[in-house]
Image (cartoon, rainbow, N blue to C red):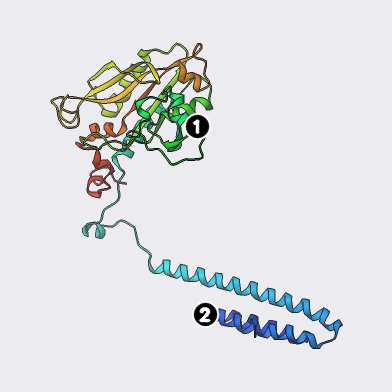
C-alpha cells in the first residue's frame, strides 16, 4: 500500500507538470482529491487493513493529500500570473513620443497651470527659509474653527459655507468637515514646532458657495506663517511684495486696506490691480479694477495660545494667498472654472513635459 501511495505521488506530479490550463488542473484535482478520487479511495480502504498498517498509512495518505492541494494551488497561481502577463503584453501601449504620434494629433501631457504656479511659489519661499507643510482635507471643528479663534456663532460655520460630514458619534465640538481653508495646517504646524519658525501650507479647500468667474466650491490656497520675536507689519508687507514681484516678474500695484479675520489682529486685505483688465474693470475683479488676493495680518494671541505658543514672548504674521486667483492673474485666465474643467484643450496651452 505504501508503494502504491509513492507511485500515486509520482504519477500526480508528472501529470501536473505537463498542464498549463486552469480547467485541466481542476480536472486533475478532481481525479485525485475528489470524493471518488484516488486518494479518497485509499483512505476508504483503510478500514480493511490491520490497525498497525492503518496507523502508518493514514498519516501518510493525509500528508500526500495536503501536498497535492498545495501543488495544485501553486499551479493555479502560476497559471493566473501567466494569463495576466499575456494580457498585459497584448495590451501594451508604446507611450514613447514620436513625430509620427504628433502628426496624428497626439501630444505630450502638460502640467496644470495651478501646479506650475504652486511649484514656483514653493521654490520662492524655500529660498527665503520657509518650510512647506501639508495636512488632511478632513478636519474637525478644533483645527478648522476653534483654534483659529472662530467662535460657534461665526457665519463661517453656517451650512451655506461649510461641507459638514455626517458624524453622529462625534463628541460635542468635534464634528468633522471638509476644511474651509488651509489655515488648519498652520495650527498643526505650530503644535509640532517651537519658535522661531516660518512655513507655508499650500493645498485644496472646500466651501459650499455659488460658482462664478472668480469663485469655486473647490479651490486652492496657500497659507503662510512666520512666528518669532519683534515681528512687525513691515515684515509682512516686505514678504508679500517680494513674493508677488517674483511671481509676476515685475512690480505689481498693490493696496493694503483694513480687514477683519478672527485669527489675526490687526487684519488687512492686500489687493492687486487686476491684470486681466489692467484696472479698467471686468468680471474677474467685479468691475472694481482690483482683485482680493492676500488676506493677512498679525497672528491673534488666542491663535498663538491654541498652537502652544506664549503670546507674551512671541508674535508673528500670517497670510492666505488665493493661489487660483494668482494663476488667473499670471496667465490671464478670465474664469476660475477653467481650472476645474479637466478640459485638455485648456491644459495644453501651458508648459509640457
Q: Left or right: where does residue 216 sit relative to residue 263?
A: left
Q: Callout 1: few (<14), some (14-19), or many (20+) C-alpha neighbours within 10 Å?
A: few
Closer to us: 127 or 290: 290
Residue 43 sits in quarter: bottom right
Residue farthest toward the bottom in the current orientation of the protein: 48
Name the secondary structure under disc 2. Answer: helix
Residue 239 seen in the current view:
no
Would you name the residue on which mark 1 appears?
172
Labelled disc at residue 131: none
Name the secondary structure under disc 1. Answer: loop
Residue at (76%, 78%) from the top-left corner? 60
Q: Position of residue 303 (x, y in %)?
A: 46, 20
Looking at the image, residue 141 lies above or below residue 56: above
Residue 338 sits in quarter: top left
Q: Left or right: where does residue 241 sit relative to residue 12?
A: left
Q: Callout 2: few (<14), some (14-19), or many (20+) C-alpha neighbours within 10 Å?
A: few
Q: Left or right: where does residue 347 sit relative to residue 45?
A: left
Residue at (74%, 79%) from the top-left corner? 61
Closer to us: 40 or 164: 164
Looking at the image, residue 350 lies above or below residue 72: above
Amino acid at each position: 500500500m505504501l508503494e502504491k501511495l509513492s507511485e500515486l505521488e509520482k504519477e500526480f506530479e508528472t501529470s501536473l507538470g505537463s498542464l498549463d490550463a486552469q480547467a485541466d488542473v481542476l480536472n486533475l484535482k478532481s481525479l485525485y482529491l475528489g470524493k471518488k478520487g484516488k486518494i479518497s479511495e485509499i483512505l476508504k480502504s483503510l478500514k480493511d487493513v490491520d490497525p498497525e498498517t492503518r496507523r502508518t498509512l493514514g498519516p501518510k495518505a493525509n500528508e500526500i493529500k495536503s501536498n497535492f492541494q498545495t501543488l495544485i494551488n501553486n499551479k493555479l497561481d502560476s497559471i493566473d500570473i501567466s494569463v495576466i502577463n499575456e494580457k498585459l503584453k497584448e495590451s501594451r501601449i508604446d507611450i514613447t513620443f514620436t513625430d509620427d504620434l504628433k502628426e496624428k494629433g497626439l501630444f505630450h501631457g502638460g502640467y496644470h497651470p495651478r501646479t506650475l504656479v504652486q511649484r514656483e511659489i514653493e521654490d520662492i519661499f524655500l529660498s527665503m527659509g520657509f518650510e512647506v507643510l501639508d495636512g488632511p482635507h478632513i478636519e474637525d471643528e478644533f483645527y478648522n474653527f476653534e483654534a483659529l479663534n472662530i467662535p460657534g456663532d461665526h457665519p463661517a460655520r453656517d451650512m451655506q459655507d461649510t461641507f459638514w460630514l455626517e458624524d453622529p458619534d462625534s463628541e460635542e465640538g468635534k464634528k468633522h468637515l471638509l476644511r474651509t481653508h488651509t489655515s488648519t495646517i498652520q495650527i498643526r504646524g505650530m503644535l509640532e514646532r517651537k519658535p522661531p519658525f516660518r512655513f507655508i501650507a499650500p493645498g485644496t479647500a472646500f466651501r459650499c458657495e455659488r460658482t462664478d468667474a472668480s469663485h469655486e466650491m473647490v479651490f486652492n490656497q496657500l497659507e503662510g506663517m512666520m512666528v518669532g520675536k519683534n515681528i512687525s507689519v513691515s515684515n509682512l508687507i516686505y514678504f508679500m511684495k517680494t513674493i508677488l514681484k517674483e511671481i509676476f516678474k515685475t512690480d505689481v500695484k498693490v493696496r493694503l486696506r483694513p480687514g477683519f479675520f478672527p485669527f489675526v489682529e490687526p487684519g488687512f486685505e492686500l489687493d492687486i490691480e487686476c491684470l486681466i483688465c489692467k484696472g479698467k474693470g471686468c468680471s474677474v475683479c467685479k468691475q472694481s479694477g482690483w482683485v482680493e488676493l492676500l488676506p493677512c495680518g498679525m497672528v491673534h494671541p488666542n491663535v498663538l495660545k491654541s498652537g502652544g505658543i506664549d503670546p507674551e514672548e512671541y508674535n508673528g504674521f500670517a497670510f492666505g494667498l488665493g493661489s487660483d486667483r494668482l494663476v488667473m492673474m499670471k496667465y490671464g485666465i478670465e474664469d476660475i472654472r477653467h481650472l476645474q474643467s479637466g478640459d485638455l484643450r485648456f491644459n495644453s496651452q501651458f508648459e509640457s513635459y
